[in-house]
Amino acid sequence: MRLRSTPLPGVTRLGTASLAILAVAALGACGARVDSGAAAGGDASASSAAGCVDTSGDSVKVGFLNSLSGTMAISEQTVHDSLQLAAEEINADGGVLGKQIDVVSEDGQSEPTVFAEKAAKLITSDCVAAVFGGWTSASRKAMLPVFESNDALLYYPVQYEGLESSPNIFYTGATTNQQIVPALDYLKEQGTTTIFLVGSDYVFPRTANKIINAYAEANGMEVVGEEYAPLGHTDFSTIVNKVKAAGADAVFNTLNGDSNVAFFKEYKNAGLGPEEMPVVSVSIAEEEVGGIGVDNVEGQLTAWNYYQTVDSPENDTFVEAFKEAYGDDRVTSDPMEAAYTSLYLWKAMVEKADSFDVAAVQEAAGGVTFDAPEGTVTVDGDNHHITKTALIGKIGPDGLIHTEWSSEAPIEPDPYLEGYDWADGLS
């Protein structure tokens, strides 16, 4: 598959003109060429990233860009923590090509425009070799043209709606066929015939729900309702009443951030729970369970590719190291594990390329593997996603998520759903 980036009509709260201004401003800082469709292996020497990254000393800069404030901080702080852990481990083990990682951290403030601005700063002012971060698809869509125009690298750690690939982004979270499709297959196997869709009002939930509607139509399932709330929304009485009245077999939840706290509290207040109407969530991990309150979500389902309870030596080591660094009360989760993994994958790509050069890293990426806490992952050099094992989990009384179902083997990434007839026309 040829790398391609999707058009940007799905970018919410950030107009095309604003993106263009940001990209031009970023380019002007280093005099880089404008080439938003730059292909992997292109002339990185002409880019701002290659032009100002300094590898002459004993360290190399990388950028961490996460929401440390705003509605998404409940989810993104732990991603930042896991990136810091990975950097400290790598530095203690000799660094990357013998150079210590020098971290420059920025706060995306849960706003797509801020993510784009901070990405431009990291690339053109701080001259980082790569950036790690982003969460919402709106933040990623806002950053994408900045990275492509500057021919720089973003490592994005969160599951998303798919239908995208870029030579300048490596996606270490799940794409649709590694999370949403397995979740739907699981519901179908459980005899689910009607589902209600609840999501935050931005690109990921709306695109994911288009995919879910297409799947449902082809698989004898009926979507009996579809409701959206703004990010950060806290009044879910109307939506929950609609969910209850619809009487669906299950709810598919694509809410993000602290809206989940309000939704599940209202859900329980309405007399709904996993026995009456189970909810499958794709953005609630161990970190969010604590914020929502275990009593409000015990028994509910999640779809991810990693849980703290994964039984493997690599995960035991990872969980122990994270708790030692941040406290025994802290938990690990899928997005932060994918972020942790992303830094190690970048290290492996750079060392395979024997270079920090963007084009060399892109060329070397295909086939790079890492024995991650979730299991061994492998980079697809064509679409820049990685193999992932799908897991359906149930939230336990201990606040942890326990695997109910597993795909057993890693699933090859198929971001454009080319292997599914029912998805024709979605991309």
Image: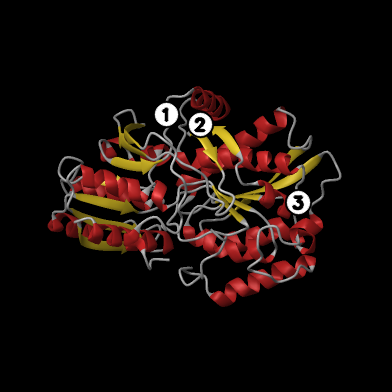
User: Tag 2: Cα neighbours inside 10 Å, few (<14), some, or many (≥20)?
Assistant: many
**Amino acid type of the residue tagged 2 in the rendering:** Pro
Tag 3: amino acid = Asp
Residue 415 showing in the rendered view:
yes
Position in image of residue 138 (x %, y %): 49, 62
Vertical arrangement, residue 411 with respect to residue 210, above or below: above
Give the alpha-carbon distance from disc 2 to disc 1, as whole Å.
8 Å
Q: Residues within 10 Å of mark 1 (few under 14, many from 20)?
A: some
- Earlier in the chain: of badge 2 and badge 3, it is 3
- Residue located 50% across and 60% down the image: 164
Q: Is residue 192 left or right of residue 1?
A: left
Task: Please say if the residues under marks 2 and 1 sit with CB atoms less than 8 Å apart.
Answer: yes
Q: Which residue is mark 1?
A: 310
> Dot 3: within a 10 Å radius of its alpha carbon, few (fewer than 14), some, or many (20 or more) residues?
many
Residue 75 horizontal/vertical position (percent)? 46, 46
Mark 2 touches mark 3? (CB < 8 Å): no
Instruction: Quickly name the residue at label 3.
Output: 357
Q: Nearer the viewer, residue 173 or 201?
A: 173
Chain-order first, disc 1 or disc 3: 1
Identify the mark nearer the N-term, 2 or 1. Answer: 1
Q: Is residue 128 left or right of residue 408?
A: right
Please state which of the two labelled residues, at mark 2 or mark 3, is closer to the viewer.
Answer: 3
Residue at (38% x, 37% y) in the render: 290
Q: CA gap, disc 1 to disc 3?
A: 35 Å
* Residue type, numbered disc 1: Val
The answer to which of 13 and 223 lies nearer the viewer is: 223
Percent coordinates x, y for residue 1 in the rendering:
53, 58
The answer to whether mark 1 and mark 3 are in CB contact below 8 A is: no
Image-quadrant location for residue 402: top left
* Total residue callouts: 3
Residue 373: mark? 2
